Amino acid sequence: MKVGVAYSEPHKQVWLTLEVPDDATVQDAIERSGILKQFPRVDLETQKVGIFGRIVKLDAPLKPGDRVEIYRPIIADPETVPRKDRVEETEEG
């Protein structure tokens, strides 16, 4: 069956489509994708993974068409980072 595997870092994004056995798990797809070789910093012991944005375990079974995602750790607390609101300019006159 065909599935996708996606991972991104600030300057490089990878989304691969690959063929896996019908009984493949999330971990099987990640290992077959080669992403662990491209991004040696990926640590499946500590990083979360998901399917279409839903966190799952590495042993979760896959269905045809699933997109496996490897998530990077959050490096800043979104509640403490100042928002960058867009300031709209207005014309006077």
Image (cartoon, rainbow, N blue to C red):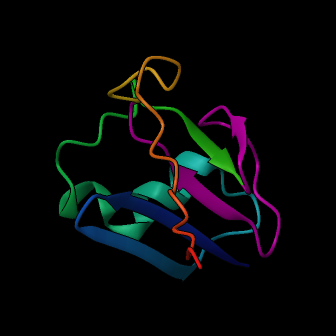
Q: Is residue 69 magenta?
A: yes
Name the magenta segment's main secondary structure: loop
The image shows a total of numbered marks equal to 0
Q: Is residue 89 above or below residue 51?
A: below
Please name whichever residue, 43 or 14, is drawn nearer the observer in this view of the structure: 14
Please name whichever residue, 16 or 75, is drawn nearer the observer in this view of the structure: 75
Left or right of residue 13, residue 60 in this image: right
Task: Please identify the quarter of the rendering in which residue 57 is found.
Answer: top right
Left or right of residue 52, residue 46 in this image: left
Left or right of residue 70, residue 21 in this image: right
Task: Please identify the quarter of the rendering in which residue 19 is found.
Answer: bottom right
For the point 40% across and 26% down, the residue is 81
Whole-percent x, y for residue 79 in the image: 53, 19
Task: Please identify the quarter of the rendering in which residue 36 is found.
Answer: bottom left
Please name whichever residue, 24 or 80, is drawn nearer the observer in this view of the structure: 80
What range of the chain is rendered magenta? Answer: 52-73
For the point 36% across and 25% down, the residue is 76
For the point 57% across and 70% down, the residue is 90
Left or right of residue 63, residue 74 in this image: left
Query: In which quadrant will I find the C terminus?
Result: bottom right
For the point 20% across and 64% down, the residue is 38
Q: Is residue 11 magenta?
A: no
Whole-percent x, y for residue 41 in the image: 19, 42
Query: In which quadrant will I find the N terminus?
Result: bottom right
Please name whichever residue, 33 or 20, is drawn nearer the observer in this view of the structure: 33
